[in-house]
């Protein structure tokens, strides 16, 4: 997942799972120029020679995410929770 501004990327990794699950939450620090989240699904193989296959790339504008249809699924909170290790 990538936020367009300020640019931030969060990645998740599932290794050799027949039924992978991505039950993770990501927090982005947004500002007034933040307006789009991009989600990419990539298959990466190899350790020395990295082979990548992009399965999907979806860019979701904030105005779509905060529409009435999806508003209940999105939490926009200016006071984000502390990450582990933060004071």
Image (spheres, rainbow, N blue to C red):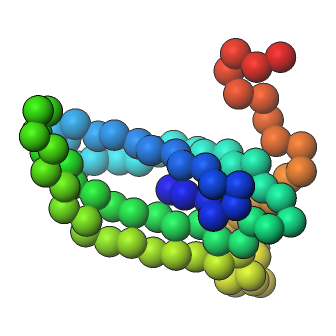
| Residue 34 horizontal/vertical position (percent) | 75, 65
Counting every numbered tag in the picture gives 0
Residue 77: x and y, percent? 85, 53
On screen, residue 29 above or below 34:
above
Classify residue 33 by image quadrant.
Answer: bottom right
Q: Nearer the viewer, residue 33 or 81?
A: 33
State the residue at coordinates (16%, 39%). 16
Quick check: can you spot residue 48? Answer: yes
Q: Nearer the viewer, residue 29 or 23?
A: 29
Q: Residue at x 70, y 61 (%)?
A: 5
Rendered view: 86 above or below 75: above
* Residue plotted at (19% across, 62% down): 53
Could you say where residue 4 lies in the image, as x and y percent from the top left? 63, 64
Position of residue 49 in the picture relative to residue 63 (left or right): left
Residue name at image x 41 percent, y 42 percent? 12
Report whether 6 appears left or right of 21: right
The percent position of residue 47, horizontal first and vertical second, equals 14, 33
Name the residue furthest right: 79
**Residue 13: quarter of image:** top left
Q: 46 or 63: which is nearer to us?
A: 46
Question: Is residue 70 at all visible to an observer of this figure?
Answer: no
């Amino acid at each position: 997942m990538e936020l367009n501004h300020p640019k931030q990327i969060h990645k998740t990794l599932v290794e050799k799972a027949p039924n992978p699950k991505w039950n993770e939450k990501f927090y982005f620090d947004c500002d007034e120029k933040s307006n789009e989240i991009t989600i990419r699904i990539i298959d990466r193989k190899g350790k020395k020679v990295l082979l990548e296959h992009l399965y999907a790339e979806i860019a979701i504008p904030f105005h779509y995410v905060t529409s009435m249809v999806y508003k209940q699924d999105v939490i926009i909170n200016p006071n984000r929770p502390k990450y582990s290790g933060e004071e």
